[in-house]
Structure formats: structure tokens, C-alpha cells
Amino acid sequence: MKKIEAYLKPFRLPDVRVALADARFDVIRVKEAEECRPTEAYTEIVQGQEYEVDVMPRVQLVLVVENHRVDRAVEILQRTGATDHDFDGLILVSPIERVISVDPREAPESGPAACPPGRLA
């Protein structure tokens, strides 16, 4: 199993979610994130006051997928997350060693085959 983390521009989220759902990636965790790029800072004027802006909004999507589905998920993220502008985002793929339920009534540790449908993308 692999964990895929994607950091994308927020306005791309609706299209990305639809494309992932269409490909049957059912569980996607989404969080707000920020990306700091001091070398790409720009100036904004708000109520007559100048502010240097070097933090850009992003959304973080996290998927846990079986190994044979990683390439498909990455392809969808690239195709639907891109804007054709600089700094579109980033995709990280890392291995998952164990899946452990928080609920003590469930098996204490299980692999992807033991996860109920819908728990993994």
C-alpha cells in the first residue's frame, strides 16, 4: 500500500474530487494547507496598507491506495490538478507499513486485504 499526498491549488479541488470518484477512489482526506515561497513574494495593498504576501493557499489531499492503483491515482491528480501555471502543486508517494484501527473492537492490525471496502481508496 502507498500513501499519496497531493498539494494543489484550492480551485482545482472540485474537478479532482469528481475524477477520483469516477475512478472509484472513494476515500479522500482533504485539509487546508499553505505553501510558503519567500522568493515568490508579491505585494498587496489592503485599506491603503502594503503587505508582502509569500504564503499561498493549497489543499492537501491524502489517499491510501493499493500498489497497483498508484499510477492511476497520480495520473488523475496530474491531469485534473494542473493549471498550466508555475507552482501548480506537488504529489508525494510513500509506503504504508501498517494499517491499525483506532477502534479496539476491530482487529488490532491488518493489511489492505483485511480493510473493509470503502476504507481505502
Image (tube, grey):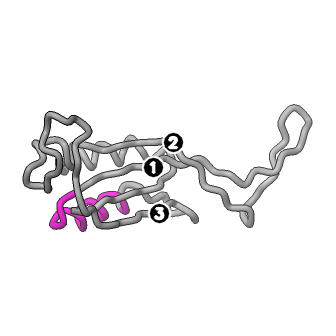
Residue 68 screen position, x and y as percent? 15, 66
Disc number for residue 60: 1
User: Which segment did they paint magenta?
Assistant: 65-78
**What residue does disc 3 label?**
90
Q: Quadrant of residue 102?
A: top left
Magenta run includes residue 54:
no
Position of 14 compared to 65: left or right?
A: right
Position of 21 compared to 113: left or right?
A: right
The front one of 30 and 49 is 30
Residue 3 screen position, x and y as percent? 31, 59
- Is tag 2's residue or tag 1's residue first in the polypeptide sequence? 2
Task: Compute the Cα span from label 3 to label 1.
Answer: 10 Å
The amino acid beneath tag 3 is Leu
**What residue does disc 2 label?**
32
Task: Compute the Cα span from label 3 to label 2.
Answer: 14 Å
What residue is shown at x 12% (from left), y 47% (from top)?
Answer: 115
Q: Are marks 3 and 1 in contact (CB under 8 Å)?
A: no
What residue is shown at x 90% (from left), y 38% (from top)?
Answer: 49
What residue is shown at x 83% (from left), y 36% (from top)?
Answer: 46
Where disc 1 sits, the SS reads: strand
- Is tag 3's residue or tag 2's residue first in the polypeptide sequence? 2
What residue is shown at x 24% (from left), y 67% (from top)?
Answer: 71
The amino acid beneath tag 2 is Glu
